[in-house]
Amino acid sequence: MVKYIMVAGGVMSGVGKGVTTASIGKILQAYGYKVTAIKIDPYLNFDAGTLRPTEHGEVWVTDDGGEIDQDLGNYERFFGFDVPKKNNMTTGQIYKAVIDRERKGEYLGQTVQFIPHIIDEIKARIRDAANGYDIAMVEIGGTVGDFENVPFLFAMKSIERDVGEDDVMYMLITYLPTPSHIEEMKTKPTQQAIKLLNNEGIFPDFIICRAKKPLDDIRKKKIETYVNIASDHVISEPDIDTIYRIPLELEKESLGIKILEHFHLRPKHKVDLSAIESLVKKIQNPTKELTIAIVGKYVDIGDYDLADSYISINQALIHAGAHMGIRVNTQWIDAKKIERGDKELDKLKSCGGVIVPGGFGNSGVEGKIKAIQYCREHKLPFLGLCYGMQLAVVEFARNVCGKTDAHTTEIAKDTKSPVIDILESQKDIIKKQQYGGTMRLGAYAAILKKDTLVYELYEKTGRLKADREKLKAMEQKKGAEFRLGVLEHKPTILERHRHRYEVNPAFVEELEKQGLVFSGYHKLDGKTSLMEFIELQGHPFFIGTQAHPEFKSRLEDPAPLFLGLVEAAAKGKK
Ligand code: GLN
């Protein structure tokens, strides 16, 4: 029987509910249980692909091609397995499924209503995603008191009625503010959030208290007295230097054992968090420090949160650094400022390496190309991700092959040297569907060329071997074939994609002749080769990938290319 832990948020959003949920899951994993997590987004968008005002904010991509808000990223980074898209649901998906079914006549004769039809759809999806696990965390987006999340709270109560109250637990993650003019931590908003949850018939079993500082016993007692929750179920979660320490901190309050006790479960073995413990120590006490520049587009996205828009890249750098005992700082560089003058480019001098991340559209493109040229010519370690790789090909075509008008047709439709272009097969998809779902999305296989740096990195990190195993398992499943390409017995890896354009096959031979190495390719329909990796010989580290390897980076299993970049940057720093 699956045990369910519902996690809701109180007081305000943005307090790290996803990371807390992932951390609690991690603890339960460390006691030997099979744990998954499900994220519910109460908005009406079908998925996060069309959610952002621009396409520049990070959208999390799952192996099976889901475009999701960053939350599943937290789960994957902590749990260490690929979380499928069905573990995220939005109000839009729920209603669409019910209405589609109604149109098909599947409810003939019935009045289709919020209760039971919408609630049943929510329950079925939660139970399907939870199936096969010992414990399923169900994180409900938004804050209690929002109209939007009432259906989901109701559905959880209904699941409780189905499975019995011993198998369901409720957690509320709140925030305790300390107003600067009184310097005292206040519990009142938390008390009120608990009452709002009570209004839905839910009496939380645990209150997780986010705050600047740890919660003292007086405040825990106060919550116990006012809202009737044992003070040892009021758990303190103060701000912290690294998110990866959260499971360790929560365990200091014996949260894992307390949860297991609630479910009448025993630890399957002694709790083992030693792997993250030693990595956290390395994060806290690095032996070296370096800076990686991220050349992106920032300013024209309103009040956009910089760090958040490249969260996976940031995390991938932290993971790689942790394994090498290196603190990796990031320096944000605005590609549009590079276009305005070389001063911005000078900032690269003090950096150990450069990342040009994914992106869309023409803003800052020439600045990014300048930054890439600088890296190539000054032998500065460079990693190009998706758009970053495409622009590295453009730079190479222009400045090495002498094709001064080379470009991507995303920007220059009529260029005579469309080194990056949309393939015919992709054009068809775009014609059929104007918005959303018009990209190459999810995990695709890439065959690696031996004697390349890319091959070496995937090989020595064990990723090549692990991905082969995964591919073998996928081969058995129907429906995944189109992503696999032709495997034969070649070294093959899996990375996630989210893009429309590709390196134009018509230019590959010429680029190769001039020294650009294509270190990996995907076989589309067994025919066309799509270029997945580029690199340059005679350069300490110059790699580009059509994929987004940052989505597969975990603290305990960092992404090979990020390890390579940080390693090269560290060598250069000597
Ligand atoms: N805009 C490019 C494309 O659509 C790159 C996308 C990306 O960087 N994710 O192919």
Image: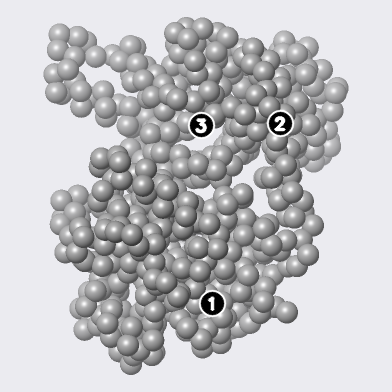
Residue 554's spot in the image, x, y percent?
A: 57, 50
Residue shown at 15%/57% (left/top)?
428
- In the rendering, which numbered label is found on residue 107? none
* Closer-to-camera residue (287/356): 287
SS state under label 3 = strand
SS state under label 1 = loop
Residue type at the position of mark 2: Val
**Quadrant housing residue 290:** bottom right
Residue that mark 2 sits on: 271
**Label 1 crowd (10 A; few <14 / some 14-19 / many >=20):** many
Q: Earlier in the sequence, mark 3 or mark 2?
A: 3
Q: Is residue 309 above or below residue 518?
A: above
Q: Earlier in the sequence, mark 2 or mark 1?
A: 2
Residue that mark 3 sits on: 37
Residue placed farthest to the front in the image? 489
Judge from the rendering whether residue 262 lies leftward or rightward of residue 232; answer left or right: left
Residue shown at 47%/55% (left/top)?
465
**Label 3 crowd (10 A; few <14 / some 14-19 / many >=20):** many
Residue type at the position of mark 3: Ala
Q: Is residue 534 above or below residue 1?
A: below
**Quadrant housing residue 234:** top right
Residue 443 can be seen in this image: yes
Distance, label 2 to label 1, CA atoms, is 40 Å
Distance, label 3 to label 2, CA atoms, is 20 Å
Residue type at the position of mark 1: Phe
- In the rendering, which numbered label is found on residue 541? 1
Residue 360 can be seen in this image: no
* Closer-to-camera residue (88/364): 88
* Closer-to-camera residue (184/64): 64
SS state under label 2 = loop
**Label 2 crowd (10 A; few <14 / some 14-19 / many >=20):** some
